[in-house]
Each structure stands twice: as C-alpha cells, then as structure tokens.
Image: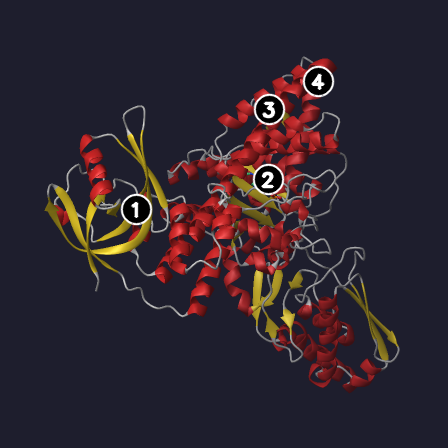
Amino acid sequence: MEKNLLPVLILREMVLFPSRELRIEFDTMEDKQLLSLIESCYQGTMLVVTPVDFLETHFELGELPFLGVEAKLKLKMEMPNGKTRIILEGLERRSVLGYHVEDEITMAEVSFFSEEEIDPKEESAYARSLLKQLHRYIKQVPYISNAILSEVTDTLPLSKLTDLVADMLPTTFSRKLDYLNEVNPVERVKMLRNDMSQDIKVFELEQAIDEKVEKELAESQKEFVLREKLQVIKKELGESNDKDDEINTLKQRVNALKCPPKVKQRLKLELRRYEMASPNSPEVGIIRDYVDWLLSLPWSYQTRDVSSLPEVKRILDSTHYGLEKVKDRILEYLAVKQNTDHSKSPILCLVGPPGVGKTSLAMSIAKSLGRRATKMSVGGIHDEAEILGHRRTYVGASPGRIIQGMRRVKTTNPVFIIDEIDKMTKDIKGDPASALLEVLDPEQNMSFADHYIEEEYDLSKVMFIATANYIEQIPLELLDRLELITISSYTEYEKLDIARNYLIPRALSEHGLTEIEVQFEEAAILSLIRFYTREAGVRELERVIASILRKIVKHFLLDKTIASCLVTSSLVEEYLGPKKYSYTPFGGDILPMEVTTYQGNGTLILTGSLGKVMQESAQIAFSYVKSKAQELGIPIEFMEKSDVHIHVPEGAVVKDGPSAGIALTTALISLFLDQKVSKTIAMTGEMTLRGRILPIGGLKEKVIGAHRSGIKEIYLPKANQNDLEEIPDDVKKDLVFHLVDHYQEIYRSLFASKKKKQEKRKELLTYR
Ligand code: ADP
C-alpha cells in the first residue's frame, strides 16, 4: 500500500467530490497562510476533509474523519475586498491512516483505495439505470438544471458518474457527505436512485396538492364573482330583496333548528341550491317544499311523560266507562314499558267492533300520559308509498303518512294511532303491511327512511297504538308485533250507563246545555238504544243523542218561554221519527234460517249470499243427516227423492263462518222429521262430519244478540264454556245454556223425546 503525507484543509458544510471542482473564499490570516504553504511546499496538493459537525470551530485530531479527497489548488486569486478565492479540483478519495501536527500544520497520512473490481457489464447496467432515473428526475423535478445532462454519459466510469450526480443533486449537506463516505460506487447508485425516486414522489404529491388548492381557490373566487354579479342582475330585474330576505330567514331557521348534523348539512346544501336556482325554474318550488318539510318536522322536542299510574287510570276512567279488563291491560302494559327499555315493548293493538271506543281510548291513553296524539287510517290503502312517501323525482311527491303525522303533532314522542290496521290490501304497488312493519319494528324504526325526506328519521320514541275490527284480517307479519287487547260489544245495560254518564253529559256541554235544562228518562235512552241504533258500539247512539239535543236547542231558541226539557220515549219518536229497528241485535246477530223440500233427486240448494265456509257447513250438515238417517228416524228414500233448499234471509248481506253448523243440521232434521223447533231456541257451533261440535269465536256478542232477540235457550259448544264468564249477569239470568259436545245431545233434547211421543200416538192410532 502506497503511503503519502498530505497537508489537511478542513471544509465546513461543504463537500468536494473527486473529479469535481469547488470554489471557496478565505478571509482569515490562518487560512491564507495555510494556503500559501500548501502552494509553495506541497505543489498545491492537499487532503480536503469535511467533518460531520460543522458548527465546531476547533477540531481535535481524533475528531477528524477517516476519509478525505486529495485535491489540487487549481486557481488562487486575491480579491480587492481582501479575501482570497480559490478553486479546488478533487482528485481521488483517500483513506486517512492518522493525523499529526507538523510545524503547526495538520498533516494526514493517507493511502489509496484499491477499489473493488466490478464486472464491466454490470457497471454499464448500473450506469444506465442511474441515467434513466436521472432523466426522469430532471423531467419531473424543476429544482435541477438539465445542463447536467451534457456532462453525464454512460461512458464515464461508474465511480465518476455517481460522484458527479451526487454533486449536482439538490440535497442536504449531510446527505452529500453520506455519498462521499460511501466508497462503493454500486452502493452509491442505489442510494442515488432511491433518493431521486423519493423526491419524485414527494414532488408529485406537492403538485397534486398545489393543483387542488389552486382549483378550490379559483372556484371560490368564481363563485364570489358570480354571486356579486347575480346580486347586481337581480337588482336590475327588481326581484332581489324578497327572495334574499326569505333566504336569510330560512338560513336563520336552519341555524336555530335542533336536528341531527346530517339533516342540518342537508338543509344548508338545499338552501344553497335554492339560492342559485332561477325563480322561474320548476325546481324552486320543489326545493322550497322540501326545505319546509325538513324545517317543520319535530327533530328533538319531546313532551314529559306522566309517570303516575293512578293518574293515568283516573284519566282513562274519566273518558271511558267500564272496560275494566281493558284498562287493566293498558296499565300493565304501561307499567312494563316504564320499567323496561322503552323502545323494545310490543305495539298495542285494540281490537273490536266499530264504535266501542278503540280510537277514543287510544287518544285517552295519550292524554293520560301527557303525550300528544296523532292518527292515520290505513284502511283501504294498497300502495306502500302512502306509508313510505314518494321519491322527490315523482311529480307532486310528498312524504308518507307517518311523516305527515309527525309534522302535524310536532313532538318526537307522540302516541301515533294507526286505525284499521286490518283493512290494508296488497297490490302491484307494493305491500303496505311490510312497509308498516318497518315503521313498527323497534330494531329498525330509529332510522326510518321516508322516500321523500331521504334523511333518516327517528321513530323510536313514538308510542304506536293500532286498532282493528277483526284479528283474522290483520296481516300475519304485523300480528307478531302486536299486543292484542280485545274490546267486545256493549250490552244494552252497558250502553245505557255509557249514555247516562258519558255521552249525554258530553253532548250537553258541547251544545251549551246543562243537566238542569235537559234530562233524559231511562226509557228514552233505552228506546234510542233499542229502536234507533243497531250497533255493537255507541257511535250511532252518540249521534242520535246529539241530533235530539240540536232539536232541543232550536226549540229553546224559538220559544224563549221554555227553559227545560225532559226527554221521554214519545219525544224521541217525535224528534227522530218512527222506530227504525224492531230489535237491535247487532254485534252478534241471530240468523234466521228457512228450509224447504220438494220432489227431486237429493240436491242441496243454498241461497242468501253464503260464504264458502258456510256453504261447506251446509254440505257437512246434509251429509251428516244422510249418513245418520236411520238413527235419526228419517226415511232415507224420502231424502233421496227430495231436493232441499236452504235460504238465509237478508240475501244482500254476506254471511260466512262455520258456526252455523249445528243450526243447519237442526234445520234439516226438523225439515225431514217435520218437527218444529221453538223460536226461542238459538244455537251456535261448528260441526264435523261425524257430529262432533267444535268451539266458535265471538260468543259474548252472539249471546247478547240472541238475548236481545228474545231467545230463551242457547245450545253452544262445551269448549266455549269459559267464554260464558264474560257475559254480563243481567243477560245470563234470562237464558238457559246447553253446553254440548256432540250433535246427538242436541238431537236427543230437541227431537228424540217428541219423536217417541209421536210414534206412540201413531201406534195408538193404528191400534184403534
Ligand atoms: P272505534 O274506534 O272503536 O270505532 P270510537 O273510539 O270512535 O270507536 O268511539 C266512538 C264514540 O263512542 C266516541 O265518542 C267514544 O268516546 C264513545 N265511547 C265508546 N266507548 C265508550 C266508553 N266505554 N265510555 C265512554 N264513551 C265511549
């Protein structure tokens, strides 16, 4: 290894690469002396070293780096300002074996690097790849002049090429030092490529950001200019202020609105669109309506619930007579709801015939809880858009009835009454029942999506109460979610009490009358119930009471001498005309039946708008009688040679259901045996082909209806025994009930005994 001693020149924050030049200026005496010495004693040759730490003013020998570049002083000029400018030419990297001081000059003992041999092919591949990257770099990154391209060629040795690129690359001092300290040119290629590709990426990113910022800036400037212009144009057109004022008010309302952030954002966006839209475009109205909808929906306001159950009960009692079981169920329901997670309780559904107080009871629940109430009827709807709304693209679109109800009621926690849930129908426009399911499902309804409103609306605080006439007709999927509470028809006596204690006092006060001025005799009320109304509930009754009161008010006004009035049966007749109904068997009706027979071939004819199930019951009855003809004492030939016609009068009213089974059988037997059955006997029950009797529904109504029609004895399925408890005592006391399991029991009690008597008579007659 060749050794050499060289004077040392320390550079600060500057790197001299081999084969490159460096311009430096000196101004201290010390430096100038050192330079003169180098020039005179060492033919201008020296070792240039750059310590890492460039802030230091004085270096210990041990702190100097072990790598330097041998350099030659190429030019030295004394400047007029007293400084000395030199140009250094870098020659080769040298490794430093040691430093020492000689005549006050730092000297380094250096040796050559014997560079590793690189395969020429590999070397040129590295060179080319470096150049390629450099071309990309220069193209992309504007911080470097492309003058460098004239200096670099792939014919340069890799070592020089890398030093050249490292020198030209705009990078930090310490990174340059890293390049210098890396003695292996292949490694240097890697470092350089890496750095360049990093820079390219950063620059691309920078550029993207710049572009975006510029674009945004341009747009906001554009918008500003356009808006200013718009103002001027509007002023010229004389249309400015109204809309601006309106927009300002809308903006204030939007800002003040307490609603989910998404809704607020949406509102702001729509307002912007509204502002920009020309006043003549059709869009204006659509946006305005939409904004109005969002602004007028209750998003956060809710009323405080009354939590005291006794108070709730007091209010329910004050509006509705009786219904003890129903009220208990409601109170239980409310108690459970208060005690558990509010949103998860099932939906109440009040079921019963019209006019028994379902809707008004639901209203009363709302009142008793201190909540507001809103109502929608879903009877007859067959389009799910009625519930979910129409999309805004639809002409004349509006939200569905749920949202409409919420807007009307203005609180987020109302009692929402869904009337006639059993009267919805399905068709091609979708299934409203499944739409309603979304509304009622506590898992989904906190984010109810009306098609018009688009933004989610929270229905989870709403208390839904449904009403229905028939359980059977409630869509099955909904039935699952409902907690059914049945309200059955009222008896005559219940109606009397309701009229006395609730309907009449209410109607009086509505007509501005007092109980001193107008009194109703009990007989008059009963007459209204029996002869002027025909209903399970009391709606009609309420109406006729009101109509009597109207006439009384008129009377009072026409004749000021009259100050009071006692409503009697005859007054009722005078005011309302002759009795409308001979009896009032509604809500459970007796069905009279006619049967006749004539010569034929055993055909069964049925008339009177009988439904399918009822027709089947008649066929079953017919088959039963035929198959048991012998036991029943009916000559089978006679049956086979006759046609039978069964007619159930009031042909226009559709009648259906299986509960006429035993009555049909009885009618047939009565016909064939030619034995009458007393008019005061009624019966209800489904019958099988073999004569077993199955339970039926609605027993209470049926029994009350029968009672009112003057029936004295009733045959009914034994399995319905429990239902008898519900029947009011004043009805029960007038009736004899026969609980039966099999038709034979009816036969025995109605026909067999008489038949025996008849036979005996026949026998006697023949003997005579
Ligand atoms: P539904 O919804 O069952 O058809 P409504 O709730 O409309 O019946 O009731 C009809 C009318 O009868 C209402 O004015 C209601 O106040 C009255 N009503 C019904 N049942 C009772 C009752 N038990 N006590 C007092 N009023 C009643």
Sooner in the amino-acid sequence: mark 4 or mark 1: 1
Residue drawn at x 62%, y 54% is 433
Residue behind label 1 places its C-beta within 8 angstroms of ligand 1: no
Residue 224, numbered label = 3
Residue 403, numbered label = 2
How many other residues sit within 10 Å of disc 2, few (<14), some (14-19) or many (≥20)?
many
Mark 2 or 1, closer to the camera: 1
Residue 495 quadrant: top right
Looking at the rendered structure, the secondary structure element under dot 3 is helix
Sooner in the amino-acid sequence: mark 3 or mark 4: 3
For disc 4, the marked residue is 233
Q: Give the x, y percent position of residue 409.
A: 55, 33
How many other residues sit within 10 Å of disc 4, few (<14), some (14-19) or many (≥20)?
few
Q: In the rendered view of the protein, which quadrant contains the C terminus?
A: bottom right
Looking at the rendered structure, the secondary structure element under dot 4 is helix
Three-letter amino acid code at the position of disc 1: Lys
Three-letter amino acid code at the position of disc 4: Ile
Sooner in the amino-acid sequence: mark 2 or mark 4: 4
Three-letter amino acid code at the position of disc 3: Phe
> What colour scheme does the image use?
secondary structure
Residue behind label 4 places its C-beta within 8 angstroms of ligand 1: no
Three-letter amino acid code at the position of disc 2: Ile
